[in-house]
Each structure stands twice: as C-alpha cells, then as structure tokens.
Amino acid sequence: MYNKVILVGNLVRDVELKYTPSGTAIGQFGIATNRTYKDTNTGESKQEVMFIDVKVFGRSAETANQYLHKGSKALVEGRLVLEQWVDKNGYKKSKHSIVAEKVLFLDSKNQNSGYESQSAPKPQRQKTQQNIPSIDIDEGDIPF
C-alpha cells in the first residue's frame, strides 16, 4: 500500500500551534490549491479550488508557526488521513486531511522574514526559467 500526497498552494489561515501534554508541538493550517481545466460543453477555461486541512508535528510545526502566515505559498508532502468524530448533536462526521511529513516554504526571502527552507542548496537559475519546486523521489517510493 502507498499513501503519499504532494500539494502546492497558499495558506488560507495562520498556523495554529498547540502542544500535547508530553510537549509535542502540533501545528494546524489550511491550504488552498487549484487547477485550471477547459469545460467540455462551453470550451471556456475554469478553475477548481480545493481547501485542505493540514497537520504538522514537532519542530516542523514550530517552524511553520514562526514563518508561515495566511497567504504564504508552501509545498506540503505527507499522507492522507480520515478523521472521524461525533458532533455535539450526536451526528457522525468525517473529513480527509493531510498529515505533513515535510513543509517547504516557497515564498521569497523578502516575503517570509528571511527564512529559507532547510532543503538542499538551490541551484542558480536563469531569469527566464520559472521557479518550479523540485521533488526528490527515489525509485523505491513509486508504487508501480
């Protein structure tokens, strides 16, 4: 079985940081992603926006809380989970969310108070090339 999700989007709210009784940090935030597609009936270009809740743990949660804010662009790599609960009226509720294993901050230095993610050094890029995040996936990570 394989459960891996990679999203790039903008935070829709600031990171909410809490701590467990044992002292582990838990950060929660929402991210918005979108895709553009062509409507087959009208031929016009449309956008589909998805809002996804993300949880991140430990030092990564504290760092995200410090440097990410509403509107920040981020790459989230993690796994999909199903959360289930019973609301105050006794109804069963559920939603899918992401438990992040890695969060990369994609804003420029000037936009995020000088923090650059702790990933490998970025190669020098030509000015005409777009800033596209690189994804390091080993062949063993691919399920097919």
Image: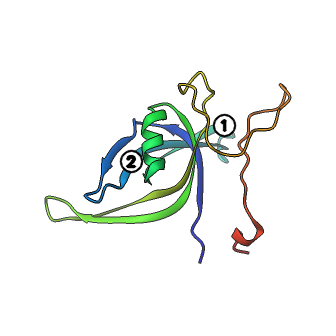
What secondary structure is found at the residue carrying circle 2?
A: strand
Q: Residue at left 81%, top 38%?
A: 123
Is 114 drawn above or below residue 10 in the view shown?
A: above
Q: Amino acid at mark 2?
A: Gln
Residue 135 placed where, x, y %? 71, 52
Numbered badge on residue 28: 2
- Residues under labels 1 and 2: Cα distance? 36 Å
User: For this view, does 76 lie left or right of residue 122?
Assistant: left
Q: Residues within 10 Å of mark 1 (few under 14, many from 20)?
A: few
Residue most extreme to the front: 22
123 to 1, vertically: above or below:
above
Sequence-first tag of 1 and 2: 2
What residue did someone put label 1 on? 44
Residue found 37% across the figure and 51% down from its top: 25
Q: Give left or right: position of 30 versus 49.
A: left
Whether label 1 touches label 2, CB < 8 Å: no
Image coords of residue 136 (percent x, y): 73, 55
Q: Is residue 48 visible?
A: no
SS under mark 1: loop
Q: Residue at x 71, y 43 (%)?
A: 133
Drawn side of residue 117 relative to residue 127, left or right: left
